[in-house]
Image: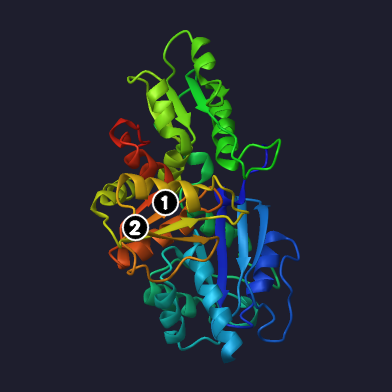
Amino acid sequence: MNTLHSSNRVHIVFAGKRNSGKSSLINALTGQDVSIVSPVAGTTTDPVSKVMEITGLGPCVVIDTAGFDDVGELGEMRVEKTVAAMRKADVTLMVFSPEDEDLSPYGDFINKSGVKNLICAVNKADLTENCDGLVKKIESTFNAPTICVSAKTGYNTDKLIALIKKHSPEKIEESTITGSLVKKGDTVLLVMPQDEAAPKGRLILPQVQVLRELLDKGANPLCATLESLASAMDTLKGAPQLVITDSQVFGKVADTIPSDWNLTSFSVLLGAYKGDIDEFTKGARAIGNLKAGSRVLIAEACSHTTTDADIARVKIPNLLHKKINPQIETTVVSGNDFPEDVSDYDLVIHCGACMFNKAHVMSRADICKKSNTPITNYGIAIAYLTGILDRVVLPE
């Protein structure tokens, strides 16, 4: 429980042409041989990730990628993986070489990837006397902070780390899963039925993350299963500040606790922490527009062995069929298998995404927005389908 999960670390993708020194720069910044360095163009093929701590930056994931000028059929596939990595990044560091006079290939690639948080670095500053001129050209072309560096000599690597930190999104220590819903001294009742798919003797990640955060906040968590909920309530001297439940038992918990108790779920909290809670709530209300033949894409961040109680393949489809229409069609995708075009679907229902960083979740929300397809998440969708969405409290 003391280890910060990779989904809560700043994800930094290093991109650029082949032989621009991306791998060398990663090794220089991290002080480790994270990536293989070679004078042969195209040494890095698939994205290579390393979870680590960088002095001056903190917990992060650095991702080395194939050069976007890779060639051939395999090269095109590698470039697509680079684009996919950039869309999930909190920060993309575009690495240039001193000989880059024509910036149009970079512009085409940046537009293709849809990168939102771009920092540029001109590597190999030790080989040129005109680095500052190229920096000004890059800054004016891409409106992105740019710096001269040298992976070989270490020149300006400390300033590059400071630049990455300055332009990184909100860090884990600056935001919390429970937000303003919980403060020091509050009693929080956690209803944690043990998922059949979870390994024996272990809590699932959302439960671990929320429980640890409550302890860090100085709150007083009380944990119970659905079966022990009534007895746990009897031990309370008054109403807890908040009840957090697994979404799969939303309805049963709502029926058990007093109607004036604040109620939410792990998935709802993660929906606000990792995504756009307003967009997810709006998407959930679109469930009422579904009809026979409507197509729903159910997306989960992780891959696992399915069971008869699987939430994506069994429980949510059953709820849709029972509450809305038995002829709604559902498709389930796992891991990275999320389509680039979801216009064929009438709704996307995403998991809480405890395994993803926020940029990854929002990249999928952007895909839905481009296709005019509503998106919601498991917790919000289940709350709507069980008729308690208006009762659920949402983090600000």
Mark 1 nearby-residue class (10 Å; few <14, some 14–19, many ≥20): many
Amino acid type for the residue under numbered disc 2: Ile
Residue 241: image location, x then y, percent: 42, 20
Residue position for label 1: 317
Q: Nearer the viewer, residue 67 or 374?
A: 374
Which residue is located at x 44 percent, y 25 percent? 243
SS assignment at label 2: loop
Q: Can you say which quadrant of the picture contains the N terminus?
A: top right
- Image location of residue 279, percent across then percent down: 31, 50
Question: Measured along the vertical axis of the image, is residue 228 above or below residue 194?
Answer: above
- Circle count: 2
Q: Secondary structure at mark 1?
A: helix
Q: Residue at x 42, y 61 (%)?
A: 364
**Whether residue 244 can be seen here:** yes
Q: CA distance from mark 2 to mark 1?
A: 8 Å
Circles 2 and 1 in contact, beta carbons < 8 Å: yes
Can you see residue 177? no
